[in-house]
Image (cartoon, rainbow, N blue to C red):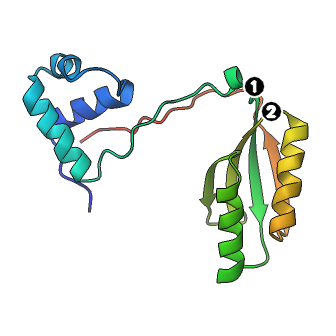
Amino acid sequence: MPARIDDTDRKILAELQRDAAQSLDEIARRVGSSKTPVWTRIRKLRNAGVIGKQTVLLDAEALGLEACFFVLIRTSQHDAAWQRAFLKALRDRPEVQEAHRLAGDIDYILKVRVKNARAYDAFYQALIAQVRVHNVTALLSMEEIKSTTDLPLEP
């Protein structure tokens, strides 16, 4: 069941999504409150599981990871042992930024960030050495048009 949040909570969450490194004083000023109530609300939201871990967003291209592939995977195996091996293979590969199990013709989609096509091929070869897949299609992203971690916070 979703946590109950009010407009002030939404404003605080929007500020944290914008920049979690800003001070409590700055957040309080921006949401029209004071420091202690904002801190109390943030603690409440953390305890409710609304706020998860805090992290830093890195620039992939600045780190030389210029190629982003979306990998569509079809499998003919759906048993628990295969799925465990597949999930382990994904967790073991730092190139995999996202993995989703899908409804429809494609079983899984992965977002894979690598240096170049040669690095993608090394990833692909390692993956198929670990688990058997029926079909793999890799799509190279030519341009990232929108990327965000922000969630919509409408009531």
Quadrant of the frame with the C terminus:
top left
Q: Residue at x 23, y 31 (%)?
A: 12
Q: Residue at x 16, y 16 (%)?
A: 29
**Residue under circle 1?**
64
Q: Position of residue 40 (x, y in %)?
A: 12, 38
* In the image: residue 78, left or right of residue 120: left
Secondary structure under tag 2 reads: loop
Which one is nearer the viewer's eye here, 94 or 148?
A: 94
The answer to whether residue 107 of the structure is visible from this angle is no
Quadrant of the frame with the N terminus:
bottom left
Q: Position of residue 78 (x, y in %)?
A: 70, 79
Above/below status of 112 relative to 58: below
Amino acid found under the numbered disc labelled 1: Gly
Q: Position of residue 97 (x, y in %)?
A: 63, 45
Secondary structure under tag 1 reads: loop
Q: Quadrant of residue 5?
A: top left
* In the image: residue 155, left or right of residue 75: left
Counting residues from the start of the chain, the first of labels 2 and 1 encountered is: 1
Q: Which mark is residue 115?
A: 2
User: Does the residue at mark 2 contact the one at mark 1 (Cβ under 8 Å)?
Assistant: yes
Above/below status of 155 relative to 36: below
Q: Residue at x 89, y 46 (%)?
A: 121
Q: Residue at x 20, y 38 (%)?
A: 42
Amino acid found under the numbered disc labelled 2: Lys
* In the image: residue 128, left or right of residue 145: right
Q: Position of residue 116 (x, y in %)?
A: 85, 33
Cα–Cα gap, marks 2 and 1: 6 Å
